[in-house]
Amino acid sequence: MTKNNNFIMLPTVDFCFKELMQNPKVRKGFIAALLKIPPTEIKETRLRPTILEKEAAHDKLGILDVYVVMEDETQIDMEMQVAPYEYWEKRVLFYLSKMYTRQIKSGEPYDNLKKCIHVSILNFIHIPDDKCYHTINFRDEETGNFYSDLFEFKILELPKLPPDTSDCGDIIRWMRFFGGKKKEEFAKMAKQDEYLEEAYQTLLKLSADEKKQLEYEARDKALRDYNSQMQSARRQGEMRINTLNRLLAENNRADDILKAAQDSNYQDKLMKEFGL
């Protein structure tokens, strides 16, 4: 392999993110920023297997990016997602529900259930507003009072990051780090605190490891291929819909154009009718 001194892995590739979270100090710094507490208050974080085993043969398997358990048994699932993912919120609820219910076995008291937190680090816009960081939980619709704090969702949307300024919170600094693109950017951010410095040094070690680099490049290629296939599928789908609308218009079936736009099953039926 030809050595490239400027090569550095990008944390938005899930392989790199998972490797970063293997470092206990990096993990502590990021989780402290998420929970808005000093890192010194975090005594222990333990990594758990990321495969949520099926309880029955017909159950759907759950596979997490990073699964962390805190000293007080709070459980945290971290997911790095680069491309838009349809039904992301339903996927998140599925994984968090599996984490929550697998904590107790038959006959054990509900009191044993501990808080579960899902962290979505997204390189696309998921929530249509200007905020780059959301904390979502269960509250009363009218009073805003907590119903339960046992489920919590933290959504970090990297494309919404505000302009780079020195005056920003810890979570914004971590988001900027995860969204970094160049070695000099990471080096500059590393000067902000010891935990980001540890993350940068870990990134350098990972990037210098030829075996890790091969794994990273394979995963990066797989993600790029997948995204390309999804874009191609969307374009083909758009072309089919445009063709269907043109054929319907030519046959004076304007009502069917409107109905198809509102009913996907009816649209599929029309596609078959016209051989699309």
Image (tube, grey):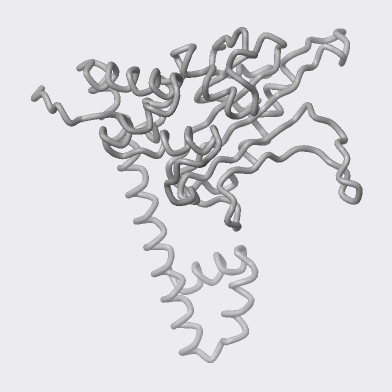
Residue 122 higher or lower than 187, as above or below = below
Give the x, y percent position of residue 7: 20, 30
248 left or right of 60 in image: left
Q: Quadrant of residue 165?
A: top left
Q: Nearer the viewer, residue 117 or 165?
A: 165
Query: In the image, what residue occupies the spot 80% across and 16% down?
Result: 113
Q: Nearer the viewer, residue 86 or 167?
A: 167
Q: Which quadrant would the C terminus be assigned to in this image?
A: bottom left
Residue farthest to the left, as pictured = 2
Q: Quadrant of residue 19?
A: top left
Residue farthest to the right, as pictured = 143
Give the x, y percent position of residue 108: 85, 8
Q: Tally the numbered discs.
A: 0
Residue 244 higher or lower than 110, as above or below = below
112 left or right of 192 in image: right
Query: In the image, what residue occupies the spot 86% across and 36% down?
Result: 146
156 left or right of 144 in image: left
Residue 63 higher or lower than 154, as above or below = above
Q: Nearer the viewer, residue 161 or 116?
A: 161
Give the x, y percent position of residue 156: 55, 40
Give the x, y percent position of residue 192: 42, 29
Query: In the image, what residue occupies the spot 57% across and 19% down?
Result: 67
Q: Which quadrant would the N terminus be assigned to in this image?
A: top left
140 left or right of 131 in image: right
Query: In the image, what residue occupies the spot 41% across and 30% down?
Result: 14
